[in-house]
Image (tube, rainbow, N blue to C red):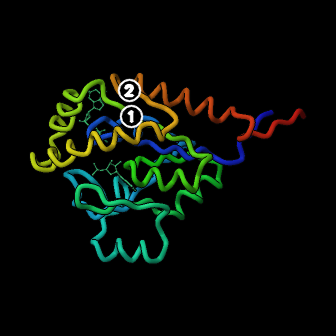
């Protein structure tokens, strides 16, 4: 019998609009939990506090940094984003896989402390398709779209720091590739105990 005592810490990054949120929602299951980040950005229509993000003002976020409540945090397009530590550690200790859907600077901070994590970078089929998706989502102003598109080259330059590239051509393809990665990672001897009863 093969057992994983601890869940996988999955870190998923990629440019805005590539489909990270869509893919992560599909990966969510009783065994695979999405971490809910804290942010100072304004909620989009339909987003809920505690579900999509914990929406805080700048002062509250800065207090969380000062009190070391965040595993990592970063500034992206003028707002703070960060991962509350306690929830992630609790889920991993319970043997759940935890997904952090975070931008590249935060991912690099996690990588320094968690070499055992699984680092996945999502790519769009093309730059044109990326722009189409972010515009099609209809949640950002033209200025915010420009600001996000201006990050893409910098973000791509971090790609080589990750362990897996996954192209999001079709959502179901990207999801099944990530499921395959999770299965292979969970089968690694270093992550398992095996016993015959
Ligand atoms: P991100 O979380 O990376 O910013 P989203 O998951 O919000 O991106 O996706 C951005 C937009 O692209 C959404 O409108 C979503 O429905 C759409 N989308 C996601 N994946 C695909 C895909 N494979 N093909 C076409 N559209 C997609
Ligand atoms: P959005 O505003 O589109 O929801 O997110 C903007 C960027 O912030 C995305 O690249 C997203 O992955 C990233 N992000 C979301 N939560 C966190 C977090 O907790 N930490 C970091 N570093 N980035 C985050």
Location of residue 77 (image quadrant): bottom left
Query: Tag 2's secondary structure?
Result: strand
- The quarter of the rendered structure image containing the N terminus is top right
Image quarter where the C terminus lies is top right
Is residue 14 shown above or below 86? above
Name above or below for residue 32 compared with residue 58: above
User: What residue is rendered at 31% in x and 29% in y?
Assistant: 124
Residue under label 2: 167
Query: In this image, 154 relative to 72: left or right?
Result: left
Q: Which residue is mark 1?
A: 122
Residue at disc 1, CB closer than 8 Å to ligand 1? yes
Name the residue at 30% across, 40% down. Answer: 15
* Nearest to the observer: residue 157 or residue 109: 157
Residue at x 38% of width, y 26% of height: 167
**How far across and down, in percent of the image, does residue 87 sit?**
52, 60
- Secondary structure at badge 1 equals strand
């Amino acid at each position: 019998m093969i057992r994983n005592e601890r869940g996988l810490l999955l870190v998923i990054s990629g440019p805005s609009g590539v489909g990270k949120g869509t893919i992560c929602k599909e990966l969510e299951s009783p065994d695979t939990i999405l971490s809910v980040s804290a942010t100072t950005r304004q909620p989009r229509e339909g987003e809920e506090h505690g579900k999509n993000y914990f929406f805080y003002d700048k002062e509250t976020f800065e207090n969380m940094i000062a009190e070391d409540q965040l595993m990592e945090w970063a500034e992206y397009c003028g707002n703070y984003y960060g991962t509350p530590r306690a929830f992630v550690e609790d889920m991993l200790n319970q043997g759940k896989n935890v997904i952090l859907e975070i931008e590249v600077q935060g991912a690099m901070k996690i990588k320094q402390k968690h070499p055992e994590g699984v680092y996945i970078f999502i790519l769009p089929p093309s730059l044109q398709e990326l722009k189409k998706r972010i515009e099609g989502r209809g949640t950002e102003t033209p200025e915010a779209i420009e600001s996000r598109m201006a990050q893409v080259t910098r973000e791509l330059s971090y790609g080589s720091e990750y362990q897996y590239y996954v192209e999001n051509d079709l959502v179901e393809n990207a999801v099944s590739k990530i499921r395959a990665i999770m299965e292979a990672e969970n089968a690694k001897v270093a992550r398992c105990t095996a016993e015959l009863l």
